[in-house]
Amino acid sequence: MADSETGRETMHDAFQYLIASSSISHKKQNIAEMLNDHFLTMADTFTSMLNMIIQMIMPSTLIMTILCLVSQAYSKYYLPMYSKPSTAREIENIFHSLEGKDSCGYDEISMQIMKLRSPFISTPLNFVYNRILSTGKFPDRLKCSIVKPLHKKCNKQMSNYKLTSLLKSLSEIVEKIMQTRLINHLTKYNILSSQQYGFRENLTTDNATYQLTYEISTAMNNKSKAGDIFCDTEKAFGFFNHNILLFKMELYGMIGKEITLYAQYPIDINENS
C-alpha cells in the first residue's frame, strides 16, 4: 500500500520481462520458474565444465601431485573447536550491533522491532540458541527465507541477476553466534592468512591498498621489479562448493556437533520468492 501511494516501483512490478537464450518471457510465473532453474543448476553446470577442462589440460599424475601437496599443507593438527554457550548479554549486544532495518523475512518481524524488544526476549532466546549449539542441530523453521532476484547490469538476461535472501531476524542472531565462535577458533590457532583482508574484523580494502603500496614502494627503492596479478571472480558465492568447505573445516578442528551444525545449515533451506 505504501509503495502504491508513493509511486515507488515494487520488486514484482520490475519484472516485466526476462530474456532466456533466444526467447523472451513476460509471464511472472514463467519468469520465476526460469530464474529458479537457472540459479539451482548454475553451480553444477559450472563445476562439470571446470572438471572437463581440468581433465583435458592436466594429466592425472599432475592432479595426484597437487592433491598430495594439499594434503601435506593440512598436516598440522588443530585441537577440536569448542562452542562455548551464549549468554543473554551477548545476544542483546548482537541485537544492538545489527542495523535496525524495517525489511522483514518470512516471519514478517523486522530487525527494528527485535532491537526494541531485545531486553525482554534475550533470555528466552538464549535458551533456544544454546540448545542449537549443544545439539548441533539447526532448526528447519529458521531456514525459511524470502529470495529476491536483483537486476545488476545491462539487459534482462538471467546471467545479469543475483539473488538476495531475506532471513528471519532470529536466524541472523544464530549466524552471528556461530560466526563469533568460528572466528575465535581460527584466530586462536592463527589459521587465517595475514594477507586476507576481506570479511575480517578491523580489516578493510584500505589495509590491502596500503600493503600493496608498501610492497611496490619497497621494490622500487631497492631497484627491484614488482608485479601484481588482479583476479575478479564473478558469481563466486554461487559456485561455492560446500563439501570442500566442510572438508577444510574438519581439518581445522571442527568435528562432532560443531561440524554437524555447519553441515546442516545449508541443507533443506525453504526459499520463497
Image (cartoon, rainbow, N blue to C red):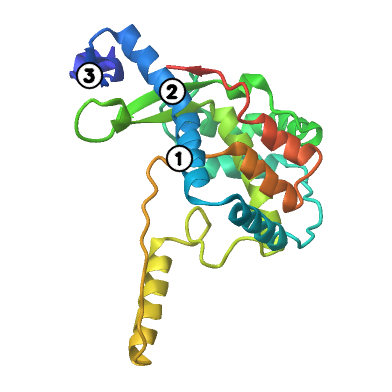
Q: Quadrant of the C terminus?
A: top left
The amino acid type, in three-letter code, at marker 1 is: Glu
Find disc 3 in the rendering and name its residue.
Answer: 22
Foreground pick, 13 / 224: 224
In this image, 231 relative to 97: left or right? left
Q: Residues within 10 Å of mark 1 (few under 14, many from 20)?
A: few
Looking at the rendered structure, the number of numbered marks drawn on it comes to 3
- Asked whether the viewer can see residue 134, the reply is yes
Foreground pick, 190 / 44: 44
Q: Nearer the viewer, mark 1 or mark 3?
A: 3
1 and 3 marks in contact (CB < 8 Å):
no
Foreground pick, 165 / 237: 237
In this image, 63 relative to 249: left or right? left
Find disc 1 in the rendering and name its residue.
Answer: 99
Q: Position of residue 193 (x, y in %)?
A: 58, 64
Q: CA distance from mark 1 to mark 3?
A: 42 Å
